[in-house]
Image (tube, helix red, strand yellow):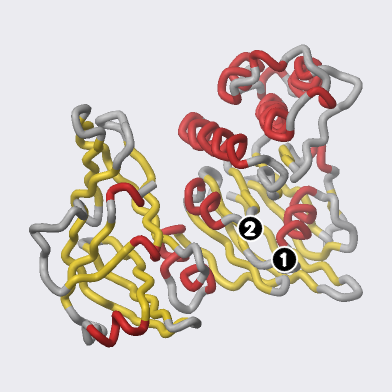
Amino acid sequence: MLCFNLAVSKADFRLNIKAELPAQGVTGLVGVSGAGKTTLLRGLAGLEEGCHGFVRFNDQHWFDSEKRLNLPLYKRSIGFVFQRPSLLPHLNVQGNLDYAWNRVPRNRRIVSISEAIEWLDIHDLLYRRPHQLSGGEAQRVAIARSLCANSDLLLMDEPLAAVDISGRNEILRLLEDIKKKLTLPILYVSHALDEVARLSDQLLIMKQGRLLAQGPVEEMLTRFDLPLAHAADAEAVLDVFVDSYDESNKISKLSGSAGSLYVTQSLSPGSRQRLRIGAKDVSIALSHADDSSILNILPATIIEISAENGGQNLLKLQVGDAVILARLSQQSVNRLSLTVGMSVFAQIKAVSLV
């Protein structure tokens, strides 16, 4: 478990945050620019001067200002992936991986170089120098190098911010696979809500240098007292099981806490997936439409309604044992006389689900 209580004072900013994070899985760290996300990561890594408090990982004490203990980064067993890859320019890709691997004691080597190469799909890049790599390629190498370092904790600070869309989606897919293979705890900073929703098991939400909320990603995304539910790209996430794939119709059937759902993607039967449901992709009906083209029509109960800007309303819906969001126009809410406690049907196009 990662436990910390850190305070940092600067001329125009103060960080004061205390939290405990599990020793496995991905914790997303979110907040507006200036919330203190990067300062927190630097404090955990021992790169931020003027820190007070403590940082402990399992039974290891990395920092304690009262005891004047402050281990340098290389003694904290932390892998750090920055927004821009900090690869060694005088070494090729293979050399960068070897450099990280050779610094690890033999008894701590869990991930091999060949595994890191395979997991990040960088076989064709091994003899290139950093200046010969695209942004996405360089970031894949940086992540592979962090894995070769066999750290106890991986910190990722906006790792995909400088990567194009295709490279970003590919790296996210690779990170999902790595998450399944390793129990390595990852603290992942991003401004992109879809990234943290896709990868995170829980979220830390920061505001003005303080912890606003912490909890499971499903809860944090749909709480009306937190900012994420009110974002333009607000969404809910569900962990689902793939029941079957219909080759003739190119559609997969899923099951989960919300019931049965259909998506127009080829997914492997028997696998577990994370489903993201955008609030703007959910509509409401008062009765079940049997003559509709929409495949996903789920019984739901309205549990909260929030008036939003621009003539919109946000609805929180209980669907089975799950909670999802729906963004509707104020006119639609008035026309259907929607109120808290009503039984309705949530309609979601199969083509809109990711």
User: What kind of residue is marked 2?
Assistant: His
* Residue 169, horizontal then vertical, whole percent: 55, 38
Marks 2 and 1, how far apart at CA: 8 Å
Local SS, label 2? loop
Q: Please tell me the numbered disc located at residue 170.
A: none
**Is residue 101 something that shows in the picture?**
yes
User: Is 226 drawn above or below residue 143 in the view shown?
Assistant: below
Q: Which residue is mark 2?
A: 191
Seen from the viewer's position, the closer of residues 62 and 353 is 353
Name the residue rendered at 66%, 14% in the picture. Answer: 124
**In the rendered image, which quarter is residue 110 located in?**
top right
Seen from the viewer's position, the closer of residues 182 and 96 is 96
Name the residue rendered at 28%, 87% in the picture. Answer: 334
Q: Which residue is mark 1?
A: 33
* Residue 89, horizontal then vertical, whole percent: 89, 26
Category of crowding for the residue at label 2, using alpha-carbon neighbours closer than 10 angstroms: few (below 14), some (14–19), many (at least 20): some
Local SS, label 1? loop
* Residue 192, horizontal then vertical, whole percent: 59, 55
Seen from the viewer's position, the closer of residues 47 and 327 is 327
**Residue 326 relative to residue 160: left or right:** left
User: Is 208 drawn above or below residue 350 in the view shown?
Assistant: below
**In the rendered image, which quarter is residue 32 located in?**
bottom right
User: What kind of residue is marked 1?
Assistant: Ser
**Residue 168 relative to residue 250: left or right:** right
Name which of mark 2 and mark 1 comes first in the sequence. 1
**Residue 174 relative to residue 257: left or right:** right
Name the residue rendered at 79%, 57% in the picture. Answer: 64
* Residue 65, horizontal then vertical, whole percent: 83, 61
Whether the residues at callouts 2 and 1 have beta carbons within 8 Å, the answer is: yes
User: Is 333 drawn above or below residue 211 in the view shown?
Assistant: below
Name the residue rendered at 68%, 33% in the picture. Answer: 136
